[in-house]
Amino acid sequence: MKKQVMVIGLGQFGMSLSRALTARGVEVLAIDRDEGRVRQAAAFADEALCFDATDEEKLAQTAPSRRDACVCAIGDEATEASIIATALLKQMGARRLVARTNDDLHERILRLVGADVVVNPERAFGERFANLLLHEGVKAELPLGGGLTVTELEVPESFIGRTLIDLALPKNYGVTVVAVRHEDRDADVIPDPKEAFTAGDVLVLVAPSKAVSTMLKKVG
């Protein structure tokens, strides 16, 4: 059975999220008060509705409690509406409630009214892009939640010819290598702690958000 997700607010974040979820086989209900955005979403989403999500009666008709997740992605232009819609979704029994925040105060309020997860896309992208900009070997980063991040990293020059046992990355930096992609192989493999790294290897790391950056500053 398909997962069902409701996305309220079809700005850049909400529209991109709706597209990505649909591409992954999720049944998306996309909602916005702007008719143009709704028409755009209707081209790919399972259902797209045009109404103001602060309208309690209309929001209730979408049955939030039956969705696997509800996302309030209302943007900067309507902070009050995002808080009201988030509170209404919680009262209507949303199982997993995700809300987009604009700033720290907004985040605290969203959590108080019931958001299970609060995201700030601009801040998250800025933090990830900073590492890509500062460290040429960083290929991609993905936050896991709980303060952890997955990082794809081209093996640092100082690691070449050394093993995981030699480097002791968890002990020295709090960084764990969970997979390695060798240049001569198609897929990631579980790392052999006794196998030396070679030029061209790509490491998949799991670590606290700033641990990889700290490690790279020390190892060069």
Image (tube, helix red, strand yellow):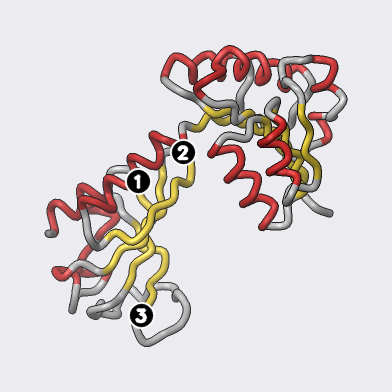
Q: Identify the image quadrant of residue 166.
A: bottom left
64 or 203: which is nearer to us? 64
**Does residue 187 appear left or right of residue 49 in this picture?**
left
Label 3, residues with CA under 10 Å away: few <14, some 14-19, many ≥20: some
Q: Residue at x 12, y 59 (%)?
A: 220
Q: State yes or no: discs 1 and 2 in contact (Cβ < 8 Å).
A: no
Please identify the residue farthest to the right as the structure is shown.
Answer: 61
Query: Which of the marked residues, 2 or 3, is nearer the chain's N terminus?
Result: 2
- First reached walking from the N terminus: tag 1 or tag 2: 1
Rendered location of residue 73, percent (x, y): 59, 31
Q: Is residue 11 left or right of residue 160?
A: right
| Cα–Cα span, label 1 and label 2 | 16 Å
Residue 51, picture quadrant: top right
Q: Residue visible at 40% across and 48% down?
A: 149
Give residue 58's position: percent from left, percent from top.
83, 20
**Residue located 84% across and 29% down the image:** 63
Residue 30 screen position, x and y as percent = 72, 38
Q: Which mark is residue 182?
A: 3
- According to the picture, the residue beneath numbered tag 1 turns out to be 128
Q: Nearer the viewer, mark 1 or mark 2?
A: 1
Residue reaching furthest to the bottom: 184
| Residue type, mark 3 in image | His
Residue at 67% across, 31% down: 8
Left or right of 159 in this view: 145: right
Query: Looking at the picture, which amino acid does disc 1 mark?
Result: Arg
* Image mark for residue 91: none
Q: Which residue is mark 2?
A: 146
Q: CB atoms at circles 2 and 3 under 8 Å apart?
A: no
Percent from the top left, x then y, of residue 218?
12, 53
